[in-house]
Image: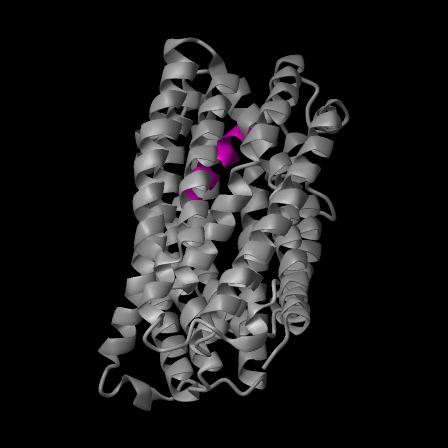
Amino acid sequence: MHTAAHLRRQLFSLTSPIFVELLLIMLLSAVDVIMLSQHSDNAVAAVGVDTQILNMVFLVFEVFTAGTTVLCARYRGARDQENVTRVIGISLLFNGLSGLLVSAALALFAEPILHLMGIRPDLMNDAASYMKIVGGMAFLQGLAFTISAVLRSMEMASYPMFVTLIMNILNVAGNYTLIFGHFGAPSLGVTGAAISTSGCRAVALCLLLFILFRKGVRVPLRIFHPFPFGKLRELLGIGLPAAGEFFSYQFSQLVITFFINKLGNEALAARAYCVNIIMFSYLFASAIGQGGSILVGWLIGRHRIEAAYKMGWFCFKAALAVTVSISVITALLGHVIVPLLTDNPIIIKLCTTILFVDILLEFGRPVNILAGFMLRSASDSTYVFLVGVSIMWSVATALSYLFGIVLHWGLVGMWIAFTMDEVIRAVLLARRWRSMKWAEKFHTQASFSEGVEQKAL
């Protein structure tokens, strides 16, 4: 039996490389924004609209990635390597095929999609160029998501971290060369950033495939004959509700972006800057959520339900404390950070105000991130989906229109609506974890009293 202290050490060993990897991924996005901001605020606004669309599209890949992480961890806990291999094979197959279809659609229909978003005419050329290149190579990200999830579930999270570090270095060099036209290259602006991003993702996928192969992970064709429909249903049972919640969130963000577009380019740019500043606040929550969910899934695979429950609460408390602390520091330093990105006084005022409103939002967001990961590990994805869809649309989307457009509170009013959404969902999801209704299906498989696990984590 593992003691509480040992489980916490395992959590730290899982979370640390995931934290660094997520930090590097966020830096990848932030570097694009920072370097494009030196090109123009309109370039940042155009890429910000594209990012909302691409984030929603990438959720197609999350259908299987979410299930892959949970099931690989659970089957490893049960020492069932044959089913681990089946899960990996199905996930790679699905994300590879769906990625090719998504990439073709984004490359061919970039302008019609952007027109549906109501993008302003002066942003269309930059936005369409970025969408065709980055969207057209989206399948690279789908396969990379799957391989990274497999490596994390096998407690090899340091490898995706190092691959992301290499991506960052290459992206900075690529942006510097192609956005501004150094080393004899043409000055391509947004198109240069798109080429750099896609090239880095191609290199990352090659490295991840090499690591997977070198670590002895093989997916023999025999696992597809007969096709393992049982494992497919398991993956979809976890992945579809998870992806449905993610899709609902991103689609609501697309609608909100449509509303923000009515406020003008300055509001669009301010939103893009704020998103890239704020994401560092909840970075730790995302990392401990992923690491904790792997450990919770492993514990459930061992039928250690009480230990999984207490591990979840430990992660909740840690994520909330760190996220709110960073959010407060970020808001206090906003008057220093934002002028580094833009000299537009309207954008600076908007961003610095929003950073203070966001402190309240961060009391809810880490709980939602953690609860989503933990409840999915416990096969309770449907509840997360139902809460997410109902509250996102009735509160975040509807009230952002009311506050921002009807009452003319602008972007700050919309952020108040986002805050209400996050806090309400956090209360509901935290109560679900505390109720332990997710554990009922496991009660017939394991005793609720587990000796050492009765000690508080």
Measured from the top left, where is residue 61 in percent x and y? 38, 59
Measured from the top left, where is residue 275 in percent x and y? 57, 34
Residue occupying the point 58% across, 65% down: 204
Position of 230 with respect to 356 (left or right) is left
Is 274 above or below relative to 16? above
The answer to which image quadrant residue 334 occupies is: top right
Magenta segment, principal secondary structure? helix
- What kind of colouring is applied to the model shown? one colour
| Residue 64 appearing in the image | no
Q: Is 53 part of what is drawn in magenta? A: yes
Is 224 above or below relative to 38? below
The C terminus sits in image quarter: bottom right
- Between residue 372 and residue 279, name the one nearer to us: 372
The answer to which image quadrant residue 96 occupies is: bottom left
Residue occupying the point 40% across, 42% down: 428
Residue occupying the point 71% across, 51% down: 173
Is 347 above or below relative to 1? above
Is 199 above or below relative to 296? above
| Residue 13 appearing in the image | yes
Measured from the top left, where is residue 211 in percent x and y? 59, 78
Measured from the top left, where is residue 19 in percent x and y? 65, 57
Position of 255 with respect to 265 (left or right) is left
Marks counted in the figure total 0
Span of residues in magenta: 45-55
Q: Is 266 part of what is drawn in magenta? A: no
